[in-house]
Image (spheres, coloured by chain):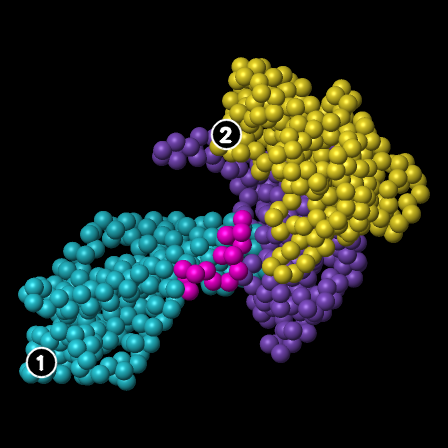
Amino acid sequence: MLEISNLHVHFDLNGTIVKALCGVALGVGPKETLAVAGESGSGKTVTALSVTRLLPSSARVTSGEIYFNGDDLLLLGEGALRKVRGKEIAYIFQEPGTFLNPVYTVGNQIMEPLLLHQGLSRAEAFAEALKLLALVRIKQGRRVFFSYPHQLSGGMNQRIGIAMSLACRPRLLIADEPTTALDVTTETEILDLLCELKSNFGFSLLFITHNLSIARRIADRICVMHKGFVVEEADTERIFSSPQHFHTKELIRAYQAIGTL
Amino acid sequence: MIIHAAHISKYFAVEGGMYKRRTGLVRALEDVSFSVRESSTLGIVGESGSGKTTLAKIVARLIAPSKGTVEFDLARINNFRKDVQIIFQNPYASLDPKMRIKEALYEPLLIHRLAAPRQLRDKALELLDIVEMGEDALVRFPAEFSGGQRQRICIARALATQPKCIILDEPLSSLDLTIQLKLLELLLRVKEKFRLTYLFISHNLSVIKYMADFVIVLQEGRIVEQGGMHELFSHPSHPYTASLLRSARR
Amino acid sequence: MAKSERAHTGMNKLLCTGIVIIGLLGALAILAPFISPYEPTLIDATSLLMPPSCAHPLGTDSLGRDLLSRIIYGARISLSIGIIAVGISLCIGVITGSIAGYFGGLADSVIMRSADIMLCFPTFFLILAVVAVLEPSIINIMVIIGLTSWMGIARLIRSEILSLKEREFIQAAKAIGASHMRIICRHLLPNALGPVFVNATLGIAGAILLESALSFLGLGVQPPVPSWGNILIESKATLGVAWWITLFPGLAIFVTILGFNFIAEGLRRQWDYNA
């Protein structure tokens, strides 16, 4: 479904070139969960953002291909790409409080992709939005619909983020450390919710994390990155039973010491 | 016992309305008592809102308790600001953004007159060496360092006054697991070397298991269980502790 | 995106322009004795009210004094009054604002209420009243303006300190045993002074305007010492016949205020991007 090959990305910061990705290659099959694990600065987020070219203006993709259902996304024009974003490929980000616009109600924001991509009328979008809120297990959907992000908890906002991303039934969901800012019980709930939604809707999940215990719980395959390179990629169990690369072993060592009880 | 906390309670007034009347009371801590043995690590576990950070600040004498006292063994801890240090949760806010690292490290040395002006640089280099950072860090500003590196600098600053006890308030929260492990290993080495007592606060049970000898479990401002780490983790007696352990094990 | 990146790198154009203008002005003021063609108080009865010419590039006034020299020396007066007056208000404002913000409680109430009371008075009339009672001298003016403009700075500093006080690095400083004085001077103020620079720059412009107004009314710098304001005293009577006496001092005031405003706005933009 998603095939990234030989991706090179660098950032141009006022003359200094910083290499973010050096030949990254990975793939996500249909209905599969791939976890991309690595430390901060390993290039995981840059990889995720490159898929639909959401990188800041100082970033340049210098080579590589990103195939999504046969099309190379890097070759698509802005218009075509916008149709893909949100509709075929959706994102959820780390800080639920920041990707929600504080001056609009939550309901307004959920309706936005519906009105934009699916051309629903306002009444239809309203009904659909309430359905989405129920899907992500938010009780009192009407009350939440008319609330503002700052009135709701982090966990609630993250569920809304998930609801928004599912609005157009995407085929690929890219989640960038969605539970890092949440406390442990909420994290468990969000992860369970994601797994349930995935089995109901059948999308593929690309999950970025620095925490191997999360990867172990939800991923079919794990891809380990370090400083812009993919250092190892394998089925989850194989990564844990026989890690090959030094950095994979480092991640596992941390996981065993303090990532799990 | 180097620290003895007796019946600590802390209430915060909720002010509301035009005249800032007291409309309610937040009971952050309610009748908390515990003791810390010298050279041991006391782990304080709780979820957000349990009052752990408030307790840390009370023990560090940054805020005063509403009721109760925290007593220190005066034979061992006679100059409080020198002998007891605290490391905070947010490495991005714990260092003065306008001060170079060397100034941040010199400051405690100067305040407590632990080094003559000529020796300051050498002492600062020693401290950086303990936390495994190089001398090029001295002239830089905090903004040039990552979260993990800043925490190392905070540890170096805390060690500058040669303390007997360090309070660590969730020092690892915003860091990667691999960096967390490296910092914990450093903290253990330092504890061993300088024979320190730690008060380690965290919501992460695996970290507490890694670090603590004794554990206190806080729920909504009250201690629900306390005891040795191994016994508590293998045979919890309070249902809340048991549920925390269950969710951590999933 | 691109525009903000450009402003980010080094000083922006507004700031540069402002600095150039004020720099030139400062140079004029400092080098006054060397570059002014005549003594500013030199009366020349043969050249009364002469329009701009080669001998007198900006013309002469009704006593034959060269306008260019008077304006150059006037720069000295205006700039020094502006800078010292603001210096005084900075001192008072920073100290009171820090005490109010850091210690809170009674000190805070007393200081802030005093500031509120002073803000109630229309400053200009207060200054007029005081100057009418005391003799109008340069020092008096500097002190009066300084004493009546500390309130804005005090409020700024107080609110910055109130928000910085709760940050972890301040608590860390307390934890290592820093004294109150040390915390305020070494940690809080360097972080709080940012917005104050903008305020102070505008304050200098305001002080210069104030001094000009006072001198124009005869209550400021007294002739024969030249100040842009008191040169303008003559302009009332000579407006029809000697346009240069109105235009050039006015232009000088205008350009100076503009320069300071550019610096203030440039600084503000700089800080907004860097903060």
Q: Which residues fall within the magenta stretch?
A: C1-16
Are the residues flagged by discs 2 and 1 from a single subunit?
no
| Magenta run includes residue C9 | yes
The chain coloured purple in the image? B
Q: Chain of mark 1?
A: C
From the image, tell me which residue sits under label 1.
Answer: C47
Question: Is A208 left or right of A120, judged from the image as shown?
Answer: right
**Rendering quarter of residue A119:** top right
The chain coloured yellow in the image? A
Instruction: From the top left corner, tell me how far across and down residue C34 is, in percent.
Output: 28, 85
Can residue B88 be seen here? The reply is no
Between marks 2 and 1 in the image, the one whose residue lies nearer the viewer: 1
2 and 1 marks in contact (CB < 8 Å): no
Q: Is the stretch drawn in magenta largely helix, strand or loop?
A: helix
| Above or below: residue A84 compared with residue B149 | above
Work out whether residue B234 or residue C230 is closer to the camera in this orientation and state it.
Answer: C230
Q: Chain of mark 2?
A: A
| Above or below: residue C63 compared with residue C121 | below
Indicate the colour of chain C: cyan
Circle 1 SS class: helix
Question: Is C92 left or right of A199, judged from the image as shown?
Answer: left
